[in-house]
Amino acid sequence: MATQTLKHNHNFTVSSITLLGSNPPKPVSGPLSAVFRSASGFPELQFFLEPDGEQSLNFDLRTTQLFRLGEVQSLCVSECSETIKEKTYSKGITIQFKEEEESSSFHGAFEQWKREVVNQGLTLPNGTVSSSKSKFDDKIESSSAKMYFHYYGQLLHQQNMLQDYVRTGSYYAAVIENQADFVGRVVVDVGAGSGILSLFAAQAGAKHVYAVEASEMADYAQKLIAGNPILGKRITVIKGKVEDVELPEKADILISEPMGTLLVNERMLESYVIARDRFLVPNGKMFPTVGRIHMAPFSDEYLYIEVANKSLFWQQQNYYGVDLTALHGTAFQGYFSQPVVDAFDPRLLVAPSTSHVINFTTVKEEDLYEIDIPLKFTASVGTRIHGLACWFDVLFNGSTVQRWLTTAPGAPTTHWYQLRCVLSQPIYVMPGQEITGHLHMIAHSAQSYTINLTMSAKMWGPGAEQGGVLQTSSCRLDLKEPYYRMSQPQAYSAAQDQQPNQLLEPEDLQFPSLDEDGLDFFQQTQNGTRADIS
Ligand SMILES: C[S@@+](CC[C@H](N)C(=O)[O-])C[C@H]1O[C@@H](n2cnc3c(N)ncnc32)[C@H](O)[C@@H]1O
């Protein structure tokens, strides 16, 4: 391929440059570095004005022209707009070379980059974006993708993730404790966001890091990386989707933070797996390596009543003279179709948890389209079960240290919190009774999942060996529409302390006040939960 004749970066030394446009023209004496590169996903010519790389002047090669003024002097201008009457140039410099030979090879490189990269639109040596419709576009609605990348393109949302110190600190520790996995290695940061994980990888001694980011955040990542020039020298930011970009070399290790609520929300794990298949060398490492979804039945009367009460509004028979009750059933179902996101007390769990493992190094992308998890628990107490509580953890399987990042209830809270699927019909169990069921999740094109949950209480006591099911309850939820409940009081209903015949009934409880939807939105933004994008 033509681009194989191009090096990653073409570096030159020039004696000085003079910035045109200012009056009088401003000379910058050197020697200065001039580099042809594609750090932002497009080809550019960059002049480093200070030896430490802190200040640079960039020319987008797609709109730049170079003219010879003499044997060792050239004019470089960047086109801004063109009308029938005139072309305008946004910036221009004259370049002074030391020798004619240097000038010639600089012009040669310029022509080559223009010919092979810009004009033919071929693969850039530092990565480029394919213009054809990608695997991502085939399965994701464009409106969803637009909102998704708009969200991640904003610094405040990246800041929310960076300020989740459990999350970011775990990544930092996993990388730094496993330097041996990074030293001298090529790394791809899948969905780099602000570029923080790329900078960690560079700190751990990576030879080169490709930071692939699809949203506008790529430009800020470029800025952050330029602001850390010692590390930034070894990082190339590529703006584009991991499904579309081409990289000039394979990676020894992938690093990414693709986890959404319940691990799979946002469907970014699929992009992580696609990146593995496209960029990772055989037996390359993945940070994180494995993810697990944990599940356990819970009992929480307060939560149940709160959700049920939300639809009470629709029981009014005289709302400004209108009978609203026709919509009560629909509203009731609607509220129970929202998974609840909050941090709950682990004492609400009424059986030891079970888990479902996803090994990122081996799972196929298609395996993530539909996930069916059989459930089987033994109740430790007699209680009313109000649904299934879920959380996840991921493992960084480093060669030196194995580190887990957990979102478990009772562990330090993360911005993912935990997730609970609430049954509109609670089920009663006695201590030792078996609870079975299924958690079935089907991916949809809005970057999330439809969840079908079924939970059944098996026959218990005398005659149980016949194995009948006593009671079954099911619900369908949309993982894209969670109910964020973070600032609600975290009531502890002492499931473990209850005697089998002393179950709490709704009438025994104080009803919490109804939420306003607007307040929910405010809370979710304040709490920085990232699932609010999907
Ligand atoms: C959860 S954020 C993590 C950001 C950063 N790695 C960190 O740990 O702070 C995921 C990032 O991946 C990006 N992303 C998601 N899907 C992507 C894809 N298919 N290709 C490229 N970037 C993607 C998002 O825009 C977002 O910035």
Image (cartoon, rainbow, N blue to C red):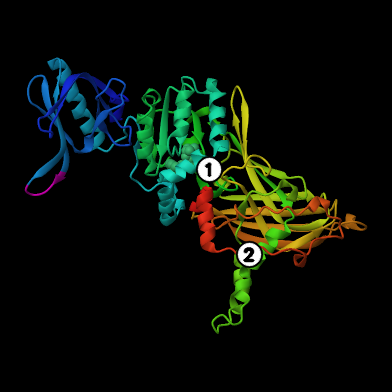
Closer to the eye: label 1 or 2: 2
- Does residue 92 appear to the left or right of 5 in the view shown? left
Mark 1 or mark 2: whose residue is earlier in sequence:
1
Q: Residue 458 carries which label?
A: none
Which amino acid type is shown beneath numbered disc 2? Ser
Crowd tier of the residue under label 1, counting other residues whose Cα lies within 10 Å: few below 14, some 14–19, many 20 or above:
many
Q: Please state the horizontal and vertical placement of residue 275, each as a whole percent of the image.
A: 47, 37
Asked whether 354 falls inside the magenta stretch, the response is: no
Which amino acid type is shown beneath numbered disc 1? Leu
Whether residue 447 can be seen here: no
Q: Name the residue under label 1.
A: 269
Q: In which quarter of the image is residue 96?
A: top left
Q: Mark 2 points at which residue?
A: 513
User: How many dots with numbers?
Assistant: 2
Q: Please state the horizontal and vertical placement of residue 530, each as a whole percent of the image.
A: 51, 48
Q: In which quarter of the image is residue 240?
A: top left
Residue at screen point 27% across, 38% down: 121
| Quadrant in the picture for the N terminus | top left
Cα separation, mark 1 vs mark 2, equals: 38 Å
Q: Please state the horizontal and vertical placement of residue 245, each as a whole percent of the image.
A: 38, 38
Q: Give the range drawn in magenta.
A: 81-85
Secondary structure under the numbered disc 1 in the rendered image: helix
Asked whether 84 falls inside the magenta stretch, the response is: yes
- Does residue 81 appear to the left or right of 247 in the view shown? left
